């Protein structure tokens, strides 16, 4: 729930989008969702096991189980492509010729003047930030702020990558890990850390996704 929001204000619809028009998203189920502002964060398409094709846990687990058999013969190592097919009629020419990612302004609004109420962020967007989880989260916060700024008629903020957006954490067993980050001047910084958190931060990941870990374990 966004701060300042009231119960019932926020709705979540999960589904695969086949196409987008000027004011509507068409889902595979046939459902249409209308929008005033749109944020596109569809990431990259990658084969299993990097990405699951189904958003449903049971189907994704079944896909992984069947892959386990095939993996004994070959491990898929092919590259990733941005998930933009469903946008081909909405923004036919707004893609980088080299990466296929969506071209954006610094405010993460789509490049050009035709769709200033539409944003792209994360792996699918052509930004200066690293293609990593922290970048996607920082950009999501910025897009929320910028949509509010459009509604209020105030100034939008540009995305400026921070060194922490590209931070790597390498776990070295249950307690030890090392954090690596390149500072603003390109110098490598490596910091060893010790944690008493033995769950490898699984609980934190569930918290980020607003999931109920205990309920899932019981089921
Ligand atoms: C194997 C692997 C390991 C990684 N390890 C790290 C790491 O250690 N640290 C790190 O910071 N980053 C890591 N990354 C990168 C990180 O996962 C991505 O940078 C990050 O998830 C990008 O977030 P995103 O929201 O842009 O896209 P995603 O997280 O890919 O989310 C995109 C979502 O859009 C949905 N979607 C796609 N197409 C449609 C459609 N047509 N309609 C509706 N929904 C759609 C997808 O189902 C998905 O849920 C890793 C990536 C991989 C593949």
Image (cartoon, rainbow, N blue to C red):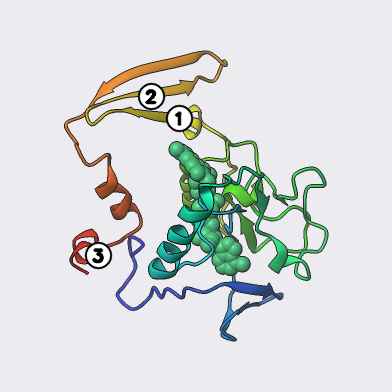
Instruction: Determine which quarter of the picture holds residue 37.
Output: bottom right
Quarter of the image holding residue 159?
top right
| Residue, far top | 187
Residue 145 vs residue 109: left or right? left
**Mark 1: few, some, or many residues within 10 Å (few <14, many ≥20)?**
many
Considering depth in this image, is 115 or 73 the residue closer to the camera? Answer: 73
Q: Residue at point 36% right, 62% down?
A: 2
Q: Circle 3 sits on which residue?
A: 216
Above or below 154: residue 173? above
Q: Is mark 1 within 8 Å of ligand 1?
A: yes
Residue assigned mark 2: 179
User: What is the secondary structure assignment of the residue under circle 2?
Assistant: strand
Q: Is mark 3 within 8 Å of ligand 1?
A: no
Q: Which residue is mark 1?
A: 167
Q: Is mark 2 within 8 Å of ligand 1?
A: no
Asked whether residue 148 appears in the rendered view, the answer is no
> Is residue 70 shown left or right of residue 178?
right
Report the residue at 58% width, 59% height from top.
42
Element carrying mark 1: loop
Q: Disc 1 or 3, which lies upstream in sequence? A: 1
* Residue located at (31% from left, 72% from top): 6
């Amino acid at each position: 729930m966004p701060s300042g929001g009231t119960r019932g204000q926020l709705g979540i619809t999960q589904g695969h989008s086949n196409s987008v028009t000027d004011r509507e998203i068409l889902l595979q189920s046939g459902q249409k969702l209308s929008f005033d502002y749109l944020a596109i964060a569809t990431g990259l398409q990658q084969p299993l096991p990097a990405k699951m094709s189904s958003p449903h846990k049971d189907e994704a687990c079944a896909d992984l189980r069947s892959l386990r058999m095939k993996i004994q013969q070959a491990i898929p190592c092919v590259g990733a492509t941005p998930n933009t097919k469903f946008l081909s009629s909405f923004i036919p020419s707004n893609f980088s010729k080299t990466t296929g990612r969506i071209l954006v302004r610094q405010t993460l609004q789509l490049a050009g003047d035709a769709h200033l109420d539409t944003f792209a962020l994360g792996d699918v967007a052509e930004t200066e930030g690293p293609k990593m989880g922290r970048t996607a989260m920082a950009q999501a916060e910025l897009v929320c702020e910028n949509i509010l700024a459009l509604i209020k008629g105030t100034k939008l903020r540009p995305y400026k990558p921070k060194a922490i957006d590209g931070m790597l954490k390498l776990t070295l067993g249950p307690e030890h890990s090392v954090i690596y980050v390149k500072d603003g001047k390109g110098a490598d910084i490596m910091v060893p850390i010790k944690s008493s958190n033995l769950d490898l931060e699984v609980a934190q990941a569930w918290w980020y996704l607003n999931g109920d870990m205990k309920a899932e374990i019981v089921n």
